[in-house]
Amino acid sequence: MDKIDTSFLTEMKASGRLPSPTGVALTILELTRNPDTSTEDLAEVLKGDPALAGQVLKFANSAGMGARTEITSLNDALVRLGMGMVRQLCLGFSVLSSARSGPCARFDYQRYWTRSLATGVGCQILSRRISSVSPDEGFTCGLLGHIGSLAMASVYPDEYAQILATWNSGTNAQLHALEEQALSLNHHQVTAAIFQDWGLPAYYQEATLNQDDHEWIHAEESTRARKLANLLNIADLVAEICLEDGPERHRLVLDFMQIGQQLEIPENEWMALYDDIMQEWNRMGGVLDILTSNLPAMENLVRRARAYDKPIDDSGNGPQAAVGGEAANPASELGLEILLATDSPVDQRMLQKKLTDAGHHVTVANDGQQALELALATNPQLILTDWMMPKMDGLELCRTLRRSDLAGRCHMLIMTSNDSQKDLEEGFDAGIDDYLIKPLNHRILMAKVRAAGRVIKLQVQSEQDKKAIERHLKTLGRQKRELDKMYEQVKTLAMEDQLTKLPNRRAGLSQLDKVWAESSRNGNPMLVMIMDIDKFKNVNDTYGHDAGDVVLRSTAAVMRNTMREYDVVARFGGEEFLVVCPGADIEVAKDLGDRIRRAVESNHIETPEFTGSISISIGVSVRNDTHTKPQEMIKEADEALYAAKEAGRNLVCIA
C-alpha cells in the first residue's frame, strides 16, 4: 500500500498527550524483527523499564501460561513467552499503562480498554481457526486497533467530547462523518498513521484503515491485510456482545452465529470459540487490571436470541408481538430462566408456550418435589408455581428454597384460587414475591413476569456491582503485594548479571562506594582488583559464543568460591570482573590474587565444543593516602591489569 499521510501526527505529538509506547517497548519491537536477536538481548533492554519488566514477569507467572514453578529471572520469562508474545505484551502493556485515563469528559476510558481487550483476545483466539494471521499479530492489532479514537479524545478532548455527544452511540459511519467534519480526519486514519509511526507492518495499517469496509474486506483478491481486517471485524462483533446488555445483544448474537455458518464451521465449535474468548478475556483482565464481566455461555445467548427473534425497541414504540395480539414486552430481553411447577397438563402447555414465545427459557416440573430438585440443580431466576401440588405444595417449596443460599434468591410467583387475606399473608410470610389469582388473566400474568424481570435485572446489576467492588478491593490488596514482590524481583534483576549470576557492573560499583565509605570512616585498608580472561576473544571466535558463555559461567563460579565470604566479585563487562576486598592490605593482595589466578588456571572446563582450561590476568590497587575517590582505584587497577597483559598474561600485577 502507499504510505499514508502522517503529517497530522506532528501536531498531536506536540500536545504531549498522544498515547505512545515507551522507548524500551519500541526498541523491543524493533529487536524482535531481527531473527538473530536473543532473549538475553531483550532482557538487557527490558531492564531499562522496571515497571514493564515487572508486568512481563507477572504475565509469565500467571495461570494461563501453565506456570508450575515461579519465574524470577527475566530471561527465563522471555524464554517461556517467546519473541512474538513478548513483542505484543510490551507494546500493549506500555500503551495501556500510560493511557488508562485522560482529559475527555465524555470518553469512557475504562470501557475503551475493556472493549479493546475483548477485541484483542477475540483476534488471538479466532486467528487459530479462521485466519492465516498469527495469534500474536492478532492480539496486538486487536488490542490497539481503535487507538485512533483514544488518541483523538486525549489530544482534542473538548472537540471529541462534542463529537461523542452528537453521535450518541450511533453507527461507525456516523462517528467517522462527525470526526471528519470537526477534525478533518477519522479515528481509523489516526490508528493507521500511529501504526506507521511505530514501524508496525504495512498490512496492519491497511487492515485498521479499512476494517469497517466490508466490500473491500471481501474483495476477490485475498490479501494478508484483508484477512486481518476481517478478523478485526469479527472480533469487534464479539466485543460488542461482551459490552451490550440490552435487546441489541440478540441481533449481535445472531450475526455472530451467521458468520460461523458462512465460514462453514460447525455450530458447536463456533460457540465454543466464543466461550474460549470469554474465558481468556476474564483471565487477561485480571492480569492487566482491566474490568471484565462473566457472561452466559454462547449456547444460552443463542437460545434466548432465537426465542426472541426480533430486536426490541426499548422506547415502547417498537413492533407488536404476534402472540395473543399483545405488545412486545421490553423486559423479555432478559430471556429469563423460568421454572414452571404445576401438575395441570393444560396449564403446563399453555404457560410454557406463552412464556417461551415471550423470549424466556422454561423448565417444567410436575410436582413440588421435582420442582425443588430442579430449582436446586438449575438455579432459575423466576419460579412460577401452583399453591396446591402433589408431594410438596407451593408454600412449602417456597419455604424450603428460601433456606438455600443460592436458589433462595430466585423470584417466587405463586398461582392460587384462594385470595383470602389470611392465606395471602401466610404466603408472603413464607417468602413469595407476588401472586396470581386463578383462573389466570394472561395479560396480568405477562405484566407480572415483566415486573419480575425488572426486579431480577436490578438484582443482577446489584450483584455485579457488589462483585466488581469486592474484586476491585481484592485486586488492590493483591496488586500491592504483587508490586512489592515485583519491586524486589526487579531490584534483583537490575543488580544481577543474568549469565554468571554475579552482581553486575552497577551492583559492583555500588558495593565499591559502600566499602570506600566504610574505609574512610574507620581507616581500615581495602583493595580493588580488575581481572580479565586471557585471549577470551579466541574462545568465542574459534568455539562459538555458547562455549564462551560456559567459560564465563565456570570462571565466575571459581572466582566466587575462592574469594573470602565478605569480598565482592562482580561481572564488570564482557570478560572483565571487578573484585572489592574490605580490610585487605598489600599482603592480602599478593596472596589472594595469586590464589584466584591458580584456581582459574587449574579449573578444567568441558563443553561439546571446547575442552581445557583458561587463564586470567589481574591488576590490583591497594588504597593509600593518594586516593581521593574509588574511581581512582579502578583506574589504577586497570593500568596494573594492562601491565600484567604486557608482561605475558596469567600474572598478578599490583599498582
Image (cartoon, rainbow, N blue to C red):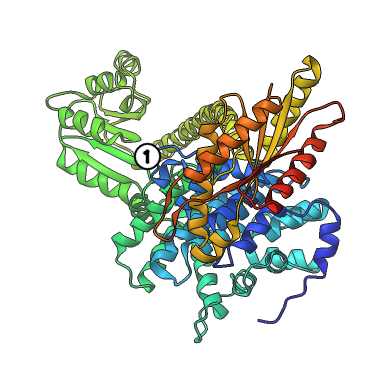
**Residue 136, image x and y in percent?**
50, 61
User: In the displayed structure, does residue 56 sit left or right of residue 387?
Assistant: right
Q: Hey, which residue is sitting farthest front in the picture?
A: 647
Q: Amino acid at mark 1?
A: Arg
Q: Nearer the viewer, residue 364 or 546?
A: 546
Q: Residues within 10 Å of mark 1 (few under 14, many from 20)?
A: few
> With respect to residue 5, does 318 lie above or below?
above
> With respect to residue 355, does 308 lie above or below?
below
**Residue 530 seen in render:** yes
User: Residue at 27% across / 18% down in the picture?
Assistant: 399
Residue identified by numbered label 1: 68
**Residue 533, image x and y in percent?**
60, 50
The quadrant where residue 476 appears = top right
User: Residue at 78% across / 28% down in the picture?
Assistant: 623
Q: Nearer the viewer, residue 324 or 189?
A: 189
**Residue 622, image x and y in percent?**
75, 30
